[in-house]
């Protein structure tokens, strides 16, 4: 167990704080939902429709709050994986070295006849399986993005129509909702922050250091050295 924890510490740490953050968000979101319901009912002189914590966890409001951030995160990673194949940033640990742009040779990638004895099986079998495996990271990130984007759009649509009915306004279709300013404002406010973070990281690692981190060059490494991690 000790060895497992040590060898998987990075993933386990982020899993733990992810679960803690989701729990905190759920508690805060439930409180906020009922506070807003009380305020709304008081304004309209109606009986408030408060919901339990369990009901909130299955609500469209909670689903939208969760998925609108997930889709932006996975869009960020999918785009970064894709663009890092062809584009470089000289001196950045987040970039390949100049001259390495593109898919690289089978020998460099240890594909097909160039696979090692301990290479993953699908790296050496050739054909469609090797192609799928060679793009598997991008494929999975892209699929998670589209799944969370769709979930966000459906849950956001439900919340939007519920608010519309509360204000005696006409509900709209899903197609109308994904073309609305409400949907794109929520999406783009998350996307722009992710794009800024990735671009900043690519530049900051050229000039700044964090001793011992896999995301940083060695402290004394030249600013112009690309794709070297400490």
Image (cartoon, helix red, strand yellow):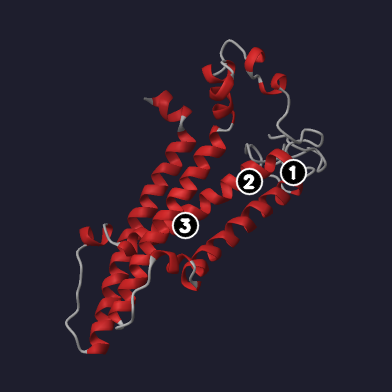
Q: Which mark is residue 80?
A: 2
Relative placement, left or right, of 222 versus 4 is right
Comes first in the chain, label 3 or label 1: 3
Q: Is residue 28 visible?
A: no
Q: Which mark is residue 95?
A: none
Disc 3: CA contacts within 10 A as few (<14), some (14-19) or many (>=20)? some
- The Cα–Cα distance between marks 1 and 2, rounded to whole angstroms, is 10 Å
Q: Position of residue 3 (x, y in %)?
A: 43, 23
Judged from the image, the secondary structure of the residue bearing numbered disc 2 is helix
- The Cα–Cα distance between marks 2 and 3, rounded to whole angstroms, is 17 Å
Judged from the image, the secondary structure of the residue bearing numbered disc 3 is helix
Q: Position of residue 206 (x, y in %)?
A: 75, 46
Q: Position of residue 49 (x, y in %)?
A: 19, 75
Query: Farthest residue in the top direction?
Result: 117
Residue 3 vs 198, above or below: the answer is: above
Residue annotated with mark 1:
87
Comes first in the chain, label 2 or label 3: 3
Disc 1: CA contacts within 10 A as few (<14), some (14-19) or many (>=20)? some
Q: Is residue 50 visible?
A: yes
Residue 158 vs 110, above or below: the answer is: below
Comes first in the chain, label 1 or label 2: 2
- The reply to whether discs 2 and 3 touch (Cβ–Cβ < 8 Å) is no
The residue sitting at 28% across, 68% down in the picture is 31
The residue sitting at 21% across, 58% down in the picture is 54
- The Cα–Cα distance between marks 3 and 1, rounded to whole angstroms, is 26 Å
The residue sitting at 52% across, 51% down in the picture is 73
Query: Farthest residue in the left direction?
Result: 47
Residue 221 vs 2, above or below: the answer is: below
Q: Nearer the viewer, residue 96 or 111?
A: 111
Residue annotated with mark 3:
69
């Amino acid at each position: 167990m000790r060895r497992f924890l040590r060898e998987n510490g990075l993933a386990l740490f982020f899993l733990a704080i992810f679960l803690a953050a989701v729990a905190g968000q759920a508690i805060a979101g439930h409180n906020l939902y009922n506070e807003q319901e009380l305020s709304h009912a008081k304004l309209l002189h109606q009986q408030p429709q408060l919901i339990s914590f369990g009901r909130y966890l299955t609500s469209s409001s909670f689903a939208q709050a969760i998925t609108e951030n997930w889709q932006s995160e996975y869009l960020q990673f999918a785009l970064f994986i894709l663009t890092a194949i062809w584009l470089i940033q000289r001196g950045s640990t987040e970039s390949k070295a100049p001259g390495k742009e593109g898919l690289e040779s089978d020998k460099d990638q240890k594909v097909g006849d160039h696979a090692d004895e301990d290479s993953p099986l699908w790296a050496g079998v050739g054909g469609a399986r090797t192609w799928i495996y060679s793009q598997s990271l991008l494929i999975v990130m892209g699929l998670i993005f589209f799944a969370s984007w769709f979930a966000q759009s459906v849950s956001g649509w439900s919340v939007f129509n519920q608010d519309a009915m509360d204000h005696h306004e006409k509900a709209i279709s899903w197609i109308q909702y994904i073309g609305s300013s409400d949907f794109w404002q929520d999406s783009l406010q998350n996307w722009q922050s992710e794009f800024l973070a990735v671009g900043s990281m690519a530049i900051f690692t050229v000039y700044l250091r964090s001793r011992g981190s896999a995301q940083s060059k060695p402290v004394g490494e030249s600013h112009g050295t690309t794709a070297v991690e400490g």
